[in-house]
Image: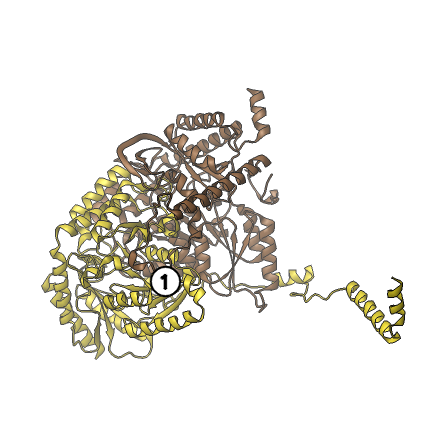
Amino acid sequence: VCKNGISNGGLYKRPFNEHFEQAPMYVAVLTYLGFGVGTIFGYVRDFLRACGLERCNLAAEREEQKDFVPLYQDFENFYTRNLYMRIRDNWNRPICSVPGPQFDLMERVTDDFNWTFRFTGRTIKDVINMGSYNYLGFAETEANALKTVADVLQNYGTGVCSTRQEMGNLDKHVELENLVAQFLDVEAAMVFGMGFATNSMNIPSLVGKGCLILSDELNHTSLVLGARLSGATIRIFKHNNMQSLEKLLRDAVAYGQPRSRRAWKKILILVEGIYSMEGSIVRLPEIVALKKRYKAYLYLDEAHSIGAVGPTGRGVVEYFGMNPEDVDVLMGTFTKSFGAAGGYIAGKKELVDFLRTHSHSAIYATSMCPPVAEQIIRAMKCVMGLDGTTQGLQRVHQLGENTRYFRRRLHELGFIVYGNDDSPVVPLLLYMPGKIGAFARHMLTKNIGVVVVGFPATPIAESRARFCVSAAHTREMLDTVRTADVLVKLTSDTSVGLDVSAWIQTQMED
Amino acid sequence: TDVHFVYWMLAPAYHLILEGILILWIIRLLFSKTYKLQERSDLTPKEKEELIEEWQPEPLVPPVSKDHPALNYTLFLYFCSPPSHKIIVNGKECINFASFNFLGLLDNERVKNAAQASLRKYGVGTCGPRGFYGTFDVHLELEDRLAKFMRTEESIIYSYGFATIASAIPAYSKRGDIVFVDEAACFAIQKGLQASRSNIKLFKHNDVADLEQLLKEQEIEDQKNPRKARVTRRFILVEGLYMNTGDICPLPELIKLKYKYKVRIFLEESLSFGVLGEYGRGVTEHFGVNVDDIDLISANMENSLASIGGFCCGRSFVIDHQRLSGQGYCFSASLPPLLAAAAIEALNIMEENPDIFQILREKCKRIHKALQRIPGLIVVGDLFSPALHLQLEETSGSRENDMKLLKRIVDYCMNRSIALTQARYLEKEEKCLPPPSIRVVVTVEQTEEELDKAASIIREAAQSILN
């Protein structure tokens, strides 16, 4: 079942395969039942805590401030207190090594059911890392690789202590920006110190009151915050659904602003390259066709897709074989594929000049620190092949192979996996709340670190485990994860997010 | 029933006719078409196409004049020294009076060595947010150390200074809550308030009487609607040392107001952390106030600690909430470990050398005195504020011309090896735009001769340009 509308096959130069299977009815029923039971228990516990029969481990307000208006509404924290707290040990797990394909976790135990944790002092070594965004494997500590970064750190220090427009504009920034522009094949680029802040500080500079923002349903919080802070009118279209987007565009251009009927000043479409919770890739050819027809502007957030898709790692624009000039604002982050921190915006020279003068970040926020800039420079040079080796290209190919292999094996097992076949973000649906905690804990006993996500990051009935495939993963590691998944499936009573017919088929084939 | 029939027959004729007409009318109304007040007249598809053809949007970005100062950056063409005490501006070595490197830790060997060790162990990036394997032991250690240093229960770190206060405010203050904020609050606070959608009440800069007036008015409002008042949270938001004016906030009076009107205080200490107080703990130590009286202290690590990022500290009851609702914390990658290690080492240095704060304060006093009575320029800022502003005594009426004059002074000083900068603002977006000014920043590394030299060069510049 393709829930993202009908795709216009003529615009695509390559096959576009996405899957969003629906769960069988009994799974949905059991999921809601699970939440219901959790909620009832929550109320019972709250009652016991209020009576004093159960110890209350929550931090409390100061005695002197007890008559102030309460800082938190009781109900706001119901979910945190009663549902999240029970499985809290699956998040915020501290690590003590480089977040490469394997890492070391600090062993953490709780004596009071997750209210407090204590470290035993032991580390769990060589846990397979399926949670970090290390797509091209640049999170490494090899001395040779990091030599230039160490040199820059020695020369420049760690901080900058000033903003871009005052004293914080270093030659490293200029070098990096030129490299990014070259990498993406655009006229100019500008870099910022934080990926989240790139969105929230630059969208308000581009659009304002009297403009319209058309934003995808599942956009990241930073895009939503940027859109809200801009003051423009926001309309949401269904996730990756081009019919919904077209309808909104037609109505917007034909009818203008509500009530006053004036024409919109500008229309900006906000989409992401790869959506991190769904694993879906944006339908870029169709969106570009729509944007050209209706004269809108396109803002593409390639946080997860830059470096991760495309024959040479240039992102979704290259993946679809399109011209980067068709996208008005190319935005991305360096955290995921380049193993550093920060974000960039690239596009035409006028756009970047405008941002240099009017971006909130250039005037009020500290610029990127030099060692981080150097890490991005060396990683990007590696991907582009400018360091004289083909290592970068090998990494991109390895990532593609690993992605396809992993997804294929999970499909064969009968799991429901969302998303595009080529996206390195692999969400595996768990649905039931009890499974969220159980899956993550079970995988940890098998020395595999996974990320599980539930409400409110996902819809309430669609909790999932999200794997992030990396170029640094070897085939053995991926097979270990797959075997662990099989064991999970066999030991659980109701199979995890099972597509019944496919499972029967696999059984029959075996 | 016979009796009823008889009564019906006995009713007067006009009565029956009237009722009959009414019944027919009701039947007609029930079956007639209803009028819809249509919000929009339906356009035919052809009309829509025409409108779509005709519509011309504005260009994505308006043109920018080529001689905007930001496009002709002061480029630092050096390769072997950081932007610390001495910097090379366009080939000329100058003394740096423009970077917020108050404690001179930007160039410190110990800090760099700690960062190198961390680089060898962890690499550069953390590749994930705090919730998904982005929590490293250095982050936990830094949070612990900061909480101990500030003598609070807990602290939380962010990976970007601007995002710290801009994420902390919307985590607590929601739509319908009231925030009393000083006029001279910095841009990050303004963005945090905008994101929170709360009611904002500005009070005059450092004017406690004005704030009390606003609080009294609010109290009267509350009495009209006590049920609403019981759930409306109130906050006072002030900075320790204001970035825009260099003043210190009157903290003891604010605390009195806090208990009198039951308002919580959020304190932004980016400039005062590591500067004020006997041991550098900020404005709470400076005034001798109990740090528990402040609900939340937020600061960035980009000034005194010469790192990147920010932190909030306070009681666990307050801080723990941000771990799930601080947007810049939950949805963003965590701080690179080498920066966290650098911050820890910087904290170590601060704890081991508590006399640098006194030295810094002496230097601030010295330059403050030396810059007094320069014809044409006034010094804006407190006696021991390390970030001062120099504003024009008489404005020419146009902001652009003022900025051009100040630029000439800056260039004059730059040519004589004193690096200064103008304070930059986003003119259209600031709530209360400060007048144009030159930033003068004092650091612990500047010698007394250098301070005197800077003051005399600025004096010369003002005399030659402004007269």
From the viewer's perspective, is A263 left or right of A156?
Answer: right
Asked if one can make out residue A409 in the rendered structure from this viewpoint, the answer is yes
Q: Name the residue under label 1.
A: A357
What's the residue at 52%, 50% (across, down)? A217
What's the residue at 31%, 31% (across, down)? A124
Q: In which quarter of the image is the C terminus of chain B?
A: bottom left
Residue B246 position within the rendered picture, expressed as x and y whole percent measured from the top left: 24, 67
Helix, strand or loop at disc 1?
A: helix
Residue B143 position within the rendered picture, expressed as x and y whole percent measured from the top left: 26, 47
Within 10 Å of the Cα at label 1, are there few (<14), some (14-19), or many (20+) other Cα atoms? many
From the viewer's perspective, is B264 left or right of A214?
Answer: left
Q: Quadrant of the N terminus of chain B?
A: bottom right
- Picture quadrant where residue B139 is located: top left
- The vertical placement of B404 against A155, above or below, is below
Residue A390 position within the rendered picture, expressed as x and y whole percent measured from the top left: 37, 34
Chain with brown colouring: A
User: A43 or B198, which is in the foreground?
Assistant: A43
Callout 1: chain: A
User: B439 or B160, which is in the foreground?
Assistant: B160
From the viewer's perspective, is B382 left or right of A309?
Answer: left
- Picture quadrant where residue B71 is located: bottom left
The colour style of the image is: by chain
Asked if one can make out residue A15 in the rendered structure from this viewpoint, the answer is no
Chain B on-screen colour: yellow
> Count of labels shown?
1
Residue B235 position within the rendered picture, expressed as x and y whole percent measured from the top left: 35, 63
Which amino acid type is marked by label 1?
A: Thr
